[in-house]
Amino acid sequence: MACLRLAGIFHFFRFVNRKKIVILVAHSVMNESESTQWTPLRKSIPTRVLEEQISLLSKYYNWVTIDEAVAMIAGDQQPVKNSIAITFDDGYTNNMTHALPILKRHGVKPVFYIPTAFLNSKEPFWFNRMDYILQCETEPYVIEAGGRSFEFDPTDRRKLSRSFKELRSFMKSKDWSDHELHRFIDDTCDRLERECEDSLQANLADDPWCSTMSEDSLRDLSTKNLATIGSHTVNHTRLDKVSAEECDAELSRSKTILENIIGTPCNHFCYPNGAIDPTARALVEKNGYGSAVTSFEGLNDSGDDVFSLRRIHLPTKFDGPALLSELCGLSYLLNKLRPTRRRQSA
């Protein structure tokens, strides 16, 4: 009876919100059984889980591209009932090697948001760099950040993961400029890398967890119409933590770089860390983008601001009822009754 009630509630809310557009967000996707040198503390979506999620959603939703989703939200196209699009942030190689084959089997065309400075695996993202080196120490240690001490125990993976999560949350909560944040990260990682005589940079090109796509990969994806390529700035910069001039440069340079690579307009943007403010939003529009996605959770309706689109995170574990509850708007309705919250993405 509980399952029948749950199914009835899902179908009711899906019908009520049938004209709203769901936009999903994911980051890294990996095969759990794949032999690798290390395993990040920050969880990726296993390929098995992604397959189950996409298969389930294909039964109840109609997949659309980001272009179609934006056109419906902007009122330029009639809504397709129960529309859903999927986005991937950061441009990991595994989005192409592990996620794309699954999406192709279901006729899904994703959008990949690319921070251009990380093309060709030149440098790892700071959160991957720190994740790797935190695991290289063999004895417990302490990291001082902003007047707080964070204890790390590499002998206990669960504790280490919890400490890393707490440190990331603390750093994002600090009123540091983007440059101050990266100065702290570089100083911390440089010290640990010297102590361990190791670094992710030395292994990045062949690392399936953290390596990023190449220019040739983007060109091939665009030419074969397998994915839409969007911008994620040049340096994965938090746009609310830099000057208007630097924000403008990040937006214009990344757009130009991507358009020169793929040979077509780059119309879509994603705010790194969901960092949107009025200045960044205005500059995104000024630079000729047609849409921008945030890390705010929820559904999108016709007439909503296309430069502050909401998304729903794909979980790293498969839970069909919970996922459907989130997408049909039931979870969103319940969350509105609680204090406003925003989920941050790296």
Image: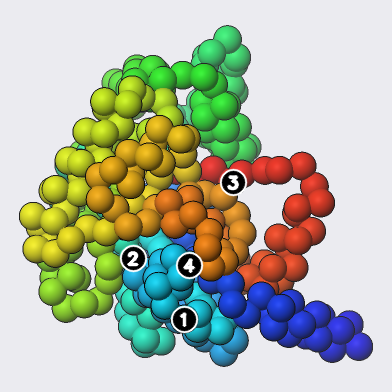
What element does badge 4 sit on? helix
Farthest-out residue, right: 1
**1 or 3: tag closer to the N-terminus:** 1
Crowdedness near tag 1: few (<14), some (14–19) or many (≥20) residues, C-alpha within 10 Å: few
Q: Position of residue 283 (x, y in %)?
A: 32, 39
Relative to residue 218, is residue 188 depicted above or below? above
Q: Give the distance between the C-alpha atoms of the residues marked 3 and 2, in whole angstroms.
A: 20 Å
Label pair 2/4, CB-CB below 8 angstroms = no
Q: Position of residue 250 (x, y in %)?
A: 25, 36
Residue highlighted by disc 1: 78
**What's the residue type where badge 1 is placed?**
Gln
Q: Give the distance between the C-alpha atoms of the residues marked 3 and 4, in whole angstroms.
A: 22 Å
Label pair 3/2, CB-CB below 8 angstroms = no
**4 or 1: tag closer to the N-terminus:** 4
What element does badge 1 sit on? loop
The quadrant the N terminus occupies is bottom right
Q: What residue is shown at x 37% (from left), y 40% (from top)?
A: 282
**What's the residue type where badge 3 is placed?**
Arg
Q: What residue is shown at x 80% (from left), y 47% (from top)?
A: 338
Residue situated in front as seen by the camera: 141 or 95: 95
Crowdedness near tag 4: few (<14), some (14–19) or many (≥20) residues, C-alpha within 10 Å: many
- Residue 77 image-quadrant placement: bottom left
**2 or 1: tag closer to the N-terminus:** 1
Residue highlighted by disc 2: 111
**What's the residue type where badge 4 is placed?**
Ile
The quadrant the C terminus occupies is top left
Residue highlighted by disc 4: 73
| Residue 135 visible in the displayed image | no
Residue highlighted by disc 3: 343
**2 or 4: tag closer to the N-terminus:** 4
**3 or 2: tag closer to the N-terminus:** 2
